[in-house]
Image (cartoon, rainbow, N blue to C red):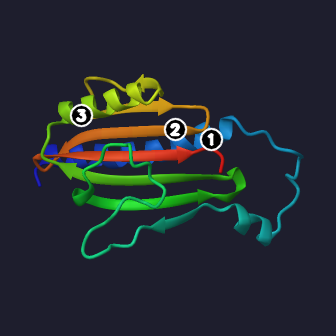
């Protein structure tokens, strides 16, 4: 792998981490504690609030989208590389994530998701148009949808995070 590919791969990994942190921060922004339990330090309380990550099981050699992933969000189902569900018990929320590679260009995939977000009624925020990873963020009162699109090994990598803010 040449230096340019390493940079692109590193950028994609950083974007995934930032997307997860952003989703968690957006979720926390709207939640107010009911009481000040800062002095409570029981193991049972800690375990009940830790996020729980479940990797979607491969079925007949194919990785499906996570259970509950909205069917109207465009994905290339047969090309999914990774599929997970993260539960946030203390926030009563869950995050469905997946990634896949496409033969379409970064511009084509970015445009596809931006058009989807617009038609689906999301409030849209766009990332930098000069970044090697193109990102578009959509918000609704009860969900956030984040899409990062980049080029890796001559193909387009699409990473999607769907955060359900309250179950």
Kindly indicate whether the residue at mark 3 contacts the one at mark 1 (C-beta within 8 angstroms). Answer: no
* Circle 3 or circle 2, nearest the eye: 2
Q: Nearer the viewer, residue 39 or 18?
A: 18
What is the secondary structure assignment of the residue under circle 2?
A: strand
Kindly indicate whether the residue at mark 2 contacts the one at mark 3 (C-beta within 8 angstroms). Answer: no
Q: Nearer the viewer, residue 42 or 35?
A: 35
* Circle 1 or circle 2, nearest the eye: 2
Can you identify the residue that label 3 sits on?
132
Image x and y of residue 47, in percent: 71, 68
Image x and y of residue 45, in percent: 79, 65
Q: Which mark is residue 83?
A: none
Can you identify the residue that label 1 sits on?
27
Q: Earlier in the sequence, mark 1 or mark 3?
A: 1
Q: Which mark is residue 144?
A: 2
What is the secondary structure assignment of the residue under circle 3?
A: loop
Q: Earlier in the sequence, mark 3 or mark 2?
A: 3
Image x and y of residue 129, in percent: 28, 23
Image x and y of residue 101, in percent: 21, 51
């Amino acid at each position: 792998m040449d230096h340019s590919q390493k940079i692109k791969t590193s950028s994609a990994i950083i974007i995934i981490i930032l997307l997860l942190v952003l989703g968690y921060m957006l979720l926390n922004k709207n939640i107010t504690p009911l009481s000040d339990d800062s002095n409570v330090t029981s193991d049972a309380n800690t375990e009940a609030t830790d996020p729980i990550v479940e990797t979607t099981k491969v079925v007949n050699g194919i990785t499906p989208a996570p259970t509950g992933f909205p069917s109207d969000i465009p994905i290339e189902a047969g090309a999914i590389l990774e599929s997970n569900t993260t539960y946030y018990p203390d926030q009563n929320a869950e995050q469905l994530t997946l990634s896949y590679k496409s033969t379409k260009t970064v511009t084509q995939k970015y445009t596809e998701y931006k058009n989807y977000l617009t038609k689906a009624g999301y409030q849209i925020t766009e990332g930098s148009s000069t970044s090697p990873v193109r990102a578009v963020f959509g918000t609704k009162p009860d969900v956030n949808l984040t899409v990062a699109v980049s080029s890796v090994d001559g193909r387009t990598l699409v990473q999607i995070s769907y955060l359900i803010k309250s179950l």
